[in-house]
Amino acid sequence: MGNQLDRITHLNYSELPTGDPSGIEKDELRVGVAYFFSDEEEDLDDRGTSGRFGVRDPSPGAEEEEGHVVLNEIEFSAFSCQECIFSKLRGNQDLSVYPIQGLLSYCNPGDLLELLFICPSEDYPPPPSPHWAVYVGQGQIIHLHRGEIRKDNLFEIGGECMGRVVSSWYRYRPLTSELVLQNACGHLGLRSEEIGWTNSESFAAWCRFGNREFKAGGEVHSGDLQYFLKLHLEENNIHTLRFHSLEDLIREKRRVDAGGKLRFLKELSMVERKE
């Protein structure tokens, strides 16, 4: 399961905070930069097709309706300081994914997009983590890809991926679309050690919300500061993980999301047998 601090901590559902605010960031926009090299290799293929992508969740349950796909995937929610900071729950949100052509009709400049590769075969290796990007307009995105902040055509970079707009998943107060695009465009061309984010999701979320917590090393690890990630596996089956930074929470959420529900349940079963 990895070596992240305090990650395997079991809590009862009743112990978790239940606040569900519309936004919690009250401080002014912080733009100080502490640069680190991205440690996540986003394996998107510029040509748009690649056998390296696999089935997001090998278990049955993906349904295709009216041009969109409903996935059988793990749902998440996250809490900090007794407030909900992240929500990906089918009961509250439409989690359908769309072909790139159909996705564009839902996009506005400044939106956050999540790109996924849906493959019909179980014979492929596990897929990479979902890829996040900032939608610029006219089919263009800005994203962290292979150690570089770059601008690409969504059709070229997405290829046979499917995607969805995920601007509302984080519950922080968003910046205006103009500031989101300013944040994204202002970092175009950065490479390697100049990059202050460990993955595409953290970069895209920082562009939209401006919170320093999305940057690598952006917050001091403290025993008083705790984040809780809830994995909604099945009805009444919720597994909770604890972290000391948002960066660690996002990294683990993406790892679990890429592996899929069945893989995580196997990992969880192995851990519980050792306890």
Image (cartoon, rainbow, N blue to C red):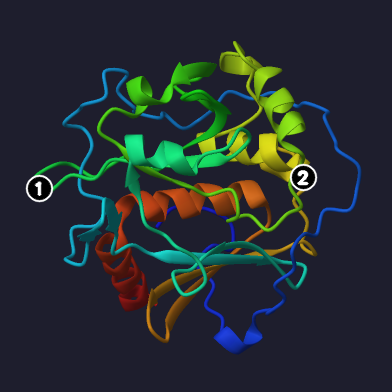
Say if 113 sits above or below 78 in the image: above
**Residue 93: percent from the left, percent from the top?**
50, 66
**Residue 191: percent from the left, percent from the top?**
57, 13
**Residue 260: percent from the left, percent from the top?**
30, 57
User: In the shown orientation, is residue 112 left or right of residue 270?
Assistant: right
Which of 247/133 is in front? Answer: 133
Which quadrant of the figure contains the N terminus?
Answer: bottom left
Q: Say which label, 1 or 2, has the lower sequence index.
A: 1
User: Which residue is at 32% across, 18% downward?
Assistant: 46
Say if 127 sits above or below 13 in the image: above
At label 1, which amino acid type do we have?
Ser
Q: How far is the residue under mark 1 from the one under mark 2?
A: 41 Å
User: Which residue is at 28% across, 40% downward?
Assistant: 117
User: In the shown orientation, is residue 187 left or right of residue 62?
Assistant: right
| Residue at the spot of label 1 | 121
Quick one: SS at disc 2? loop
Q: Is residue 120 visible?
A: yes
User: Which residue is at 42% across, 87% downward?
Assistant: 236
At label 2, which amino acid type do we have?
Glu
Residue 56 image label: none
| Residue at the spot of label 2 | 219
